[in-house]
Amino acid sequence: MIDAIICTIGDEILIGQVVDTNSAQLSQALEEAGIHVKRMISIGDNPEEIASVLLEALSRHAIVITTGGLGPTKDDITKAVLGQISGSKGYVTHPGQLEMVHKILAKRGLDALPSNLAQAQVPDSAEVIVNKLGTAPIMVFRDVRGGGTLYALPGVPHEAAGAIPDVMDDILRHQPTESILHRNIMVYGIAESALSERIATWEDALPADMHLAYLPNPLTGIRLRLSVYGGEADGNRRRVEEQMAALKVLLGPLVYADKDSDLETSIGELLKKSGKTLSAAESCTGGEIAHLITSVAGSSAYFLGSVTSYAVSVKEGVLGVPAETIERYGVVSSEVAAAMAEGVRRITGSDYAVSTTGLAGPAGDERNPVGTVWIGVAGPRGVRTVSYCFKNDRKRNIERFAASALNFLRMILLEED
Amino acid sequence: MIDAIICTIGDEILIGQVVDTNSAQLSQALEEAGIHVKRMISIGDNPEEIASVLLEALSRHAIVITTGGLGPTKDDITKAVLGQISGSKGYVTHPGQLEMVHKILAKRGLDALPSNLAQAQVPDSAEVIVNKLGTAPIMVFRDVRGGGTLYALPGVPHEAAGAIPDVMDDILRHQPTESILHRNIMVYGIAESALSERIATWEDALPADMHLAYLPNPLTGIRLRLSVYGGEADGNRRRVEEQMAALKVLLGPLVYADKDSDLETSIGELLKKSGKTLSAAESCTGGEIAHLITSVAGSSAYFLGSVTSYAVSVKEGVLGVPAETIERYGVVSSEVAAAMAEGVRRITGSDYAVSTTGLAGPAGDERNPVGTVWIGVAGPRGVRTVSYCFKNDRKRNIERFAASALNFLRMILLEED
């Protein structure tokens, strides 16, 4: 297996001003390709430190990927250091990147300053992959001092993310990697430990060349990934599908997608298929459900809108929850969740509506402990509610409330389909 | 200045399943205390690698902080490695942490398994800071092999965050740090380059012992931090206040808080002072404004609720935007933004209301380019609107739309106060 090192460069990471998300994105892509990330390192804009860390990494590992340090300001000295350690004799202008610099500045309505144009200059020891999203080119330095290959990516997260497919393509063309096949399914509504117990017999009987990974996430549940390393592609694909068919029987409706996905995408697919529309009424989730649903491109085809009813007056006045229901059962109750879902369904005219009312924290109230949520789903066949109690902090409780509501909605959509 | 190294331990970071947020939180706290983070390193659950990375770091740096690798499962081998490199002769049970383990499991309704109880055992070379949020104790190993001090924190983000104050306290009691004074103000509505130009004369005239940092963030604008290193505290405080008074005159209403804060907190303070209430009508921001406002603890005192009106039918039916307004001016227009704000103000009965309608991306429409937003604010003195056009991707556009709306609301609240 080939090893890689990821190195982020820039003082803004070391002082904690920016959270490094580039390394996680890169390592996901590398790991899926069967390349093992041995270490991630963050260092500041210091030439000696950059040179020594990178030279050591290149002497030991086949692939070193850097992000950051390539901006036009004077503290961005990474390009000069890379030229120096790779034995460059000088700079050359890359015509493709120069064209991109002019294009990007024109789009932003800015004049091209000398510092912008200098972005298209690279050490003559570099190969260039044009950065289509920004002015700094992606540079490849092969066999640096007889060691590994270095890929230098811009630090801006969406530029780094945009560079990953081209970089992975280059890596796989130049490195002898084993063939690898991944197959994902998404599971929601079961704890990792219970899931592991439930499928233990199946998992223990997997052939030696297959490996199962549990990849949990609070918003999307557990991704189960079955991988086969080496061997023949068509045969592997057939063998993996056979194993997956058996696994899906074991898990039933806990499986919500037959590929890497999330609950909001899966709900969108169900709604698009049935031609139904959706609305939401949120109290404790404060807009998180609407945010998740509208993060899916094309969601305007089925999502009509939502009401965040923080105040009792909005529950009553906008959603039409009867005052006596709130008085009698309390705000956090099955009855109020039901009335909220019915209310938002009525005022928006949607086919389905999902609602939440609960106590995310920090405190509970006289009737319910902190972490309690009631979820309602109203639809053509009436309204149903469910309750959970989670033991997390406020932020995490809100995430679990929202994900549980989406999953409850999904189960009802499936059932009524 | 004292140097520190932060090291996160765990395969889940190296495969990109988890984004490391602990390092940023730790380095913020260290940097505010005048301790310089030289490097961040992420490594896997590999005993030889953990030992070699930590011993090298401890031989060169006064402080090494690890997070992760302390769970009860068999891949969490960090505690054993720490005992070994620090010359431990065996394990001892820490009574304070043991009590905490029992308490936490009882609260979660779980039986105490042997693996849980073992969490309270630490190498006899460790001092313990009780972890009040989880079962794994915070361990301190002083002068490891005659080198630096190592702090081992749990990896769960809220447990790591909860440990930071106690760890900083211990560091500052044991390390000879220079006195340091920070003073923050928050600025919104000006680009970093324009801000830097505007205050250049003032900044250039700062005394040599004062340092100004620009700390930008898409959701909160720019934090300006003025720091004084060394010297006498009372005198420093007076001198910093004098400089800040001059700076605030230069910036006027661009300054929205006289301390480290954010727009939603600042708006909450204005509303609480005036006793007014707020609601929101969101189209392109899809719940982001409600989410930001309700993330402030105590926001239920002034935030009544919001409507996410994704569909035209909800703009018309729920918010009462006239169909002819939409027909005549288009959905993304000053007129629709105004009618949305007035509509949600009317149905919720709030004093103020803020609205957004725009095109976050990926595409624009026939009337407006992608990145266009119209923002409305309705209040007791009528309704006002403003428009912006940003050139970012969808996610970043939504953030800037929401922050611009909050800032427009803030300016009007200030003016009408």
Image: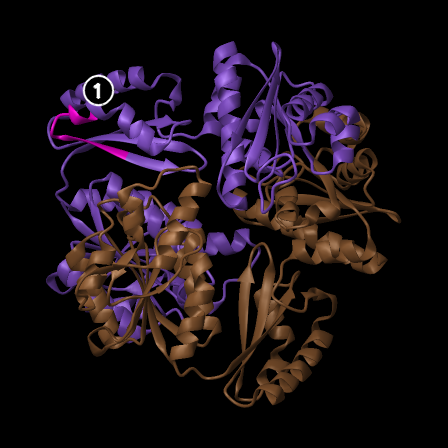
Chain colours: A purple, B brown
Q: Nearer the viewer, residue B233 or B189?
A: B233
Vertically, is A161 above or below A73? above
Magenta extent: A203-213
Q: Residues within 10 Å of mark 1 (few under 14, many from 20)?
A: some
Residue assigned mark 1: A243
Which quarter of the rendered picture does the C terminus of chain B lie within? Answer: bottom right
Q: Quadrant of residue A238?
A: top left
Vertically, is A245 above or below B407? above
Q: Quadrant of residue A77?
A: bottom left
Q: Nearer the viewer, residue B208 or A209?
A: A209
* Residue A202 within the segment the image draws in magenta: no
Count of numbered tags? 1
Could you tell me if residue A19 is visible in this image?
no
Return the chain for callout 1.
Answer: A
User: In this image, A6 relative to B266: left or right?
Assistant: left
Could you tell me if residue A168 is visible in this image?
yes
Q: Position of residue B340 (x, y in %)?
A: 76, 36
Residue at position x 67%, y 77% in the image:
B247
Q: Position of residue B385 (x, y in %)?
A: 77, 47
Q: Element type at marker 1?
A: helix
Which quarter of the rendered picture does the N terminus of chain B lie within? Answer: bottom left
The amino acid at mark 1 is Gln
Residue at position x 33%, y 43% in the image:
B17
